[in-house]
Amino acid sequence: MKNNHMPDQAKRPPTAALYITCLANSLRPEIGHACVQLVESLGFKVDVPLDQTCCGQPGYNAGHRDQAIAVAKTQITALQGYDWVVVPSGSCAGMIINHYPRLFDQDTDWLERATRLAARTRELCQFLEEQGWHPGTRPQHRTQHAWAYHTSCSCRRETHSHEQGHRLLLKAGIRLAHLHDQEVCCGFGGTFAAKFDPLSSRMGQKKLAAIEQCSATGVTSADLGCLLQLQSLDRSGLSFCHIAELLAGTNATERQS
Amino acid sequence: MQRKMDHSKVSDSHARYQILAKLRARAGATSNAPTRKPESGQSPPIQFQSADEFAATASRNGALVAFAASEQDALQTVKTLSEENDWRQPPTIAPELLGSDANRHANRLWRRASANPTPAGSVAVTRAFCGIRDTGTLLCLATAEQPGSWNFLAEHHVVLLDKGCIVMGKADAWRLLTQKQLPQKQLAQKQPARHRAIHLISGPSRTADIEQTIQLGAHGPRTLTVILLG
Amino acid sequence: MNKHGANGFAAQSQQALDDTALQSALGHAQSGFVKKRAQAIAMVDEFEQLKANAQAAKRQALANLAPLLEQFEQNLIRNGGEVHWAQTPQELNATVMAIARNANGRRIIKGKSMIGEECELNAALESAGFDVVESDLGEYIIQLAKEPPSHIIAPAIHKTRQQVAELFRQYHALGERGLDAISDLVGEARTVLREAFLTADIGITGANVLVAENGSIALVTNEGNGDLSATLPRVHIVVTSIEKVVASMEDASLILEVLARSATGQHMSAYTSFYSGPRQAQDPDGPDQFHVILLDNGRSEMLGTPFEPMLNCIKCGACLNHCPVYTNVGGHAYGWVYPGPMGSVLTPLLQGLDAALPLPNASTFCGRCEEVCPMGIPLPDLLRQLRAQQHEQKREPRRWRWGLTLYSRLSRHPRLFSWNLRLSRAMLRWLPQRAWPNQRTPIRPSGDTTFLEQWRTRAQNGLKNAAQNGPQQGK
């Protein structure tokens, strides 16, 4: 096991690994670029470990504990040696922070590694606010679109960083529409959406109805899973954009307007 | 008949043995056997609470609150309320409140009466053992002079509560019941070793079982009036 | 109970989604319970402390269940009551009937009891020739409708007022009485049920808490129906379960502090009564006989296992009211008497894993149930453990078993995983609309390739790019 070097400000910039998540990696790579830009703007040396795959949540939540343990070991190994690990998803960050250590309650060596990783891991908004992110020189005009901020259940209840996301959006000058029933789930729930599609769809449609009610024209969230769930059910042409892109100002919708 | 009952007793005791054995066997496996700190020494004396604050929490529960200087005044208030609100029946009053035997004969039990025993506009007047400020709750004991059913059968329930007998929470109320820290008037009620029933009453009878719409007087009293005495 | 039980969840939930009357009824519930609970909790200074107190009282009780139950029994017998034990619903039902027959009782009035529902006590009593009337308004409505409850504290929450009026017209001799307003419906039930209270031989209620130190049972209602059932008939039978015992009146009150606030958003329900036994010489009313039946039905098996926290449950219903699944499909979809998150845990534990395969999976793990649970039950975690049991016993659908296993295997091999993602991207790009479920439009991947591929390319060209373009800005 490599030593985990503590940041030495005088010699080198602190390092941050981006844990991109399998959904953003495969479906929305632009989120990764936005994250790199945001974290670099805080003076960190960003790396994206190429051996990362998936946090193992699909198997873990299905009760495949042994497999989840094997997957977690792969990720823990891939993510060692960085000062910070930044995850643009409350769901995957919560998995690493809250659930990895619980997987190794029988294995002291791995428990120690998992605990150490958990302590260094942050959900993106959590990280940005803790590190004092500000929109910098980017013109801070109020955005054209009114965005509904969907606080994902995992940001709310796993990483407790939904309010941080909200504050960052305000700081970046994003115009926010007031969304009702924010604490209600959008119906994604990983494999739930596939196993119980009609139910998941109804939950998503109710969330979209709430979004329409607040006259937002776009939806943002720190969890891509929720955004994809809502996008697949949307009939009214809303824009869907991960919070990283809105904060970084790299979102196509906003740039056109 | 009797034999059937005996049979059930036998299977009962088998079930009892089985259940307790399982619980004992598994108690060892319980990881979270906590031991709370034993209460150290004597608990502090009960702090009695202000009537105004009780009035506020009781009204929040939907109780009507009135004040009276004495029991006589309180009964006068009941009379006035009856006239104003069209409570048509003569009130059934706990004998101890009447101070004499004069009207005791009027207080026949409703239980198992033949004709409609609780007609529209019926009123019961009782005295609470104490009040609980936190939740605006009346603690009422079922006693020889105040049958428990009186709390539930009438359409309108009036409860007299001594201003000096209001405690903060339920824990203090239990202490009042079990300790000797009783105000004089409550001593009379406290006599039996065991009360068949202790009723904590926090507002009139209500239901929201149809479309989550609150309706008062589901089965018990439609109104609850607290008269604070003293 | 539902014909297919809990295993029919998928079909039953689809049916529920299509039932417009049910959807309208569920709409009322959602806003009502959630808002009232939030308001009640906002008015308390330290709700977290109240929760911690209640949990501590319960934990201590669970660690000492056997001695506490014996103490409860001893004290209740001293008070003149009788205690019975039942391992199964059949034993409980048989005991109730034996008591009723022994007392020559035929007419029974019932206060709402989930243990009664769990044992299907009404059906057993009715088929044995007893007259049984439910007195909780909601329970009475579903008794007329011949349905199981759809909510543990609001059994008829799935009914609209029109449906209730229809039932009353069918079963009551109405005469001149109208049923237009909800208050008419409540008044109608009051009139009819008052007669039943006054003529019943036997009253059956549940109990919310059992108090070991004095052999009392606590009964919480808003209507007062439980108290009339407990006070007026000659015989009072309490059907309850072993995990409800706590040490003292003080511990009982700690639980009461969180119960009503979590359930209906009241600080206290209108009536909380402690009954300690039959009437004594000086008592002018109360039953001549007082029986408590303690049901196990699988609960002792949960003690000392990872599912022990489920025994903390005080049946407040907060997890149902806040569950996005429950609030969309209602209680009947769950197929047994306990719905929502607590039901999805309890049903497989009490009925067997195979009797409720879909339930542990019917959750998005949004975590709101755990957040609102006053007793700190880690419901999502317990559901996950039930999924693990299904996996270990090979009870999950095969395509999920193998699909997820394959995905986990791939996740351990970065290169294979990367190929898989690129393959998936290609498939998603070309997958036709008809391959997606009806209501959904296809999700198409953006960009040329995966982010990691783009990063690898960037890293390879890093030095060159840096020299040519200056610092990277996003894509």
Image: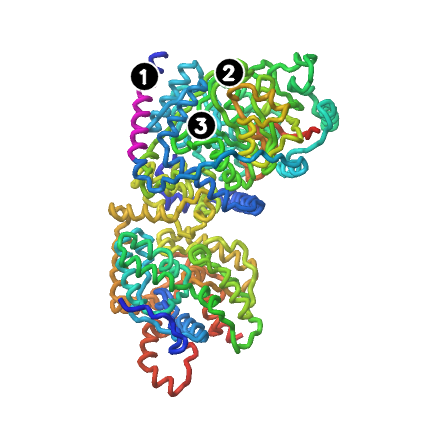
Q: Position of residue C55 (x, y in %)?
A: 44, 41
Left or right position of A238 against A25: right
Q: In whole angstroms, how far apart are the C-alphas of marks 2 and 1?
A: 28 Å
Residue C196 visible? The answer is: no
Left or right position of C122 against C351: right
Of B71 and A39, nearer the camera is B71
Is B44 rendered above or below residue B113?
A: below
The reply to whether the C-beta atoms of the residues labelled 2 and 3 are less than 8 Å apart is no
Mark 1 vs mark 3: give the one in front.
3
Q: Which residue is mark 3?
A: C213
Circle 1 — which element?
A: helix
Circle 3 — which element?
A: loop
Q: Which residue is mark 1?
A: B7
Quarter of the picture holding the N terminus of chain C: top left
Q: Which residue is mark 2?
A: C280
Give the residues in magenta.
Answer: B6-25
Chain under disc 1: B
- Residue type (three-letter) at the residue carrying disc 3: Glu
**Mark sitting earlier along the chain (2/3):** 3
Q: Position of residue C22 (x, y in %)?
A: 49, 42
Give the number of the disc on residue C393: none
B12 within the magenta span = yes
Callout 3: few (<14), some (14-19), or many (20+) C-alpha neighbours within 10 Å? some
